[in-house]
């Protein structure tokens, strides 16, 4: 089954995010290994988009809140067990 948003084919979750935002998620999140110059250019582009579309911030907050509400399992916190093993004895003169 194919999923279309308007006339755009959405295949991955990033496709849906891009169509919902109207911009690629990488514009807001960055990409691994980007240079300082690339980051500055990306942030400048993002500022220009927000200046042209001041309502976009509210739209993004509504989108994020909807995701949290519809998929709370994405934000489950699983406590990790404390490490086990021998504890070191306190150093001489160290506060206990």
Image (cartoon, rainbow, N blue to C red):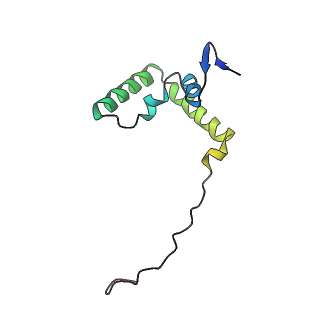
Residue at figure coordinates x 41%, y 26% from the top left:
46
Hey, which residue is sitting farthest bottom in the picture? 92
Percent position of residue 54, x then y:
48, 24
Percent position of residue 73, x then y:
66, 46
In this rendering, is residue 74 above or below 88?
above
In this rendering, is residue 8 above or below 18?
above
In this rendering, is residue 52 above or below 94?
above
Percent position of residue 31, x then y:
41, 34
State which quadrant residue 12 falls in. top right
State which quadrant residue 18 falls in. top right
Hey, which residue is sitting farthest top in the picture? 7
Residue at figure coordinates x 45%, y 30% from the top left:
26
Hey, which residue is sitting farthest right in the picture? 1
State which quadrant residue 33 falls in. top left
The N terminus lies in which quarter of the figure? top right
Residue at figure coordinates x 48%, y 25% from the top left:
24
**From the viewer's perspective, is 40 left or right of 80?**
left
Hey, which residue is sitting farthest left in the picture? 37
- 93 or 86, which lies in front? 86
In this rendering, is residue 44 above or below 82?
above
- 58 or 66, which lies in front? 66
**From the viewer's perspective, is 30 left or right of 92?**
right
The C terminus lies in which quarter of the figure? bottom left
| Number of disc labels | 0
């Amino acid at each position: 089954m194919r999923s279309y948003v308007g006339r755009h084919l959405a295949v991955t979750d990033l496709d849906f995010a891009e169509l919902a935002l109207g911009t690629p998620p990488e514009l807001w999140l960055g990409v691994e290994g980007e240079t300082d110059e690339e980051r500055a250019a990306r942030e400048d582009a993002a500022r220009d988009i927000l200046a042209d579309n001041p309502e976009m911030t509210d739209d993004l907050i509504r989108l994020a809140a909807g995701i949290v509400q519809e998929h709370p399992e994405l934000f489950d916190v699983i406590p990790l067990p404390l490490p086990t093993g021998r504890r070191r004895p306190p150093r001489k003169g160290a506060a206990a």
